[in-house]
Image (spheres, grey):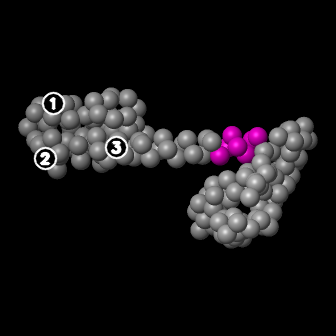
């Protein structure tokens, strides 16, 4: 069975739209219908039938209508280049999912987002990097356990506030 480019795009869009609309559907009734449409599209695609939900047309018209309120030129550009923009968004979505997964894995395994022995920025560590060496140094200065320092830094906004808390013995 030969698939056209347009049909392949609908298949990709349905797979990406389902988890996004499912999460948004938890908070808004508007997205529950779109979740069901994308699920129907996926089930039809898996059974080698044509997707009849028109999900891509709904998304295209909604976004174009939103752009039309602000700029007709932008709306026209989006409408004409919808397929290219959709593929770009799909690639960005998949890349960000991959990068986020790698970051979570590294954080769970190494305690930072960037892998072993890295001191780069990690979004999962809101207070900044507090490596084992730094935590051990602070712990030795204060005469407490390294794990207490790490827990203290997690619960306070700055290392200074944490040091004051640990010195008070709380």
Q: Residue at x 70, y 57 (%)?
A: 11
What residue is shown with label 1? 137
* Residue 89 place in picture, x, y as percent: 67, 43
Placement of 168 over or under 17, stated as above or below? above
Of residues 25 and 14, the one nearer the viewer is 14
Tag 2–tag 1 contact (CB < 8 Å)? no
Report whether residue 79 is seen.
yes
Figure quadrant of residue 127:
top left
Q: Which residue is mark 3?
A: 107
Q: Secondary structure at mark 2?
A: loop
Q: Is residue 34 left or right of residue 113?
A: right
Of marks 2 and 1, which one's residue comes earlier in the chain? Answer: 1
- For the residues labelled 2 and 3, the Cα–Cα distance comes to 30 Å
Camera-side residue: 19 or 144?
Answer: 19
Outermost residue toward the front? Answer: 1
Q: Residue at x 21, y 31 (%)?
A: 134
Tell me, yes or no, whether the highlighted magenta stretch contains residue 163: no
Instruction: Specify few, some or many for label 2: CA neighbours under 10 Å numbering under 14, 14-19, or 20 or more.
Output: few
What range is drawn magenta here? 84-90
For discs 2 and 1, the disc positioned in front in the rendered view: 1
Secondary structure at numbered mark 1: helix
Counting from the top left corner in percent of width and height, residue 166 is at: 17, 43
At x 48% / y 41%, what residue is drawn? Answer: 99
Q: Are marks 1 and 3 in contact (CB under 8 Å)?
A: no
Mark 2 or 3: the one toward you: 3
Residue 169 tag number: 2
Q: Is residue 85 magenta?
A: yes
In three-dimensional space, the C-alpha distance between marks 1 and 3, rounded to whole angstroms, equals: 22 Å
């Amino acid at each position: 069975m030969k698939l056209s480019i347009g049909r392949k795009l609908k298949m990709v869009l349905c797979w990406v739209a389902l988890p996004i609309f499912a999460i948004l559907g938890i908070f808004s009734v508007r997205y529950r219908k779109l979740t069901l449409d994308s699920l129907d599209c996926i089930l039809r695609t898996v059974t080698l039938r044509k997707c009849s939900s028109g999900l891509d047309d709904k998304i295209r018209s909604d976004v174009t209508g939103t752009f039309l309120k602000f700029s007709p030129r932008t709306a026209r550009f989006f409408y004409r280049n919808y397929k290219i923009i959709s593929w770009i968004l799909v690639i960005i979505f998949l890349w960000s999912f991959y990068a986020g997964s790698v970051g979570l894995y590294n954080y769970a395994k190494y305690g930072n987002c960037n892998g072993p022995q890295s001191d780069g920025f990690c979004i999962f560590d809101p207070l900044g990097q507090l490596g084992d060496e730094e935590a051990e140094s602070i712990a030795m200065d204060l005469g407490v356990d390294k794990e207490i320092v790490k827990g203290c830094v997690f619960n306070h906004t700055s290392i200074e506030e944490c040091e004051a808390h640990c010195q008070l013995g709380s």
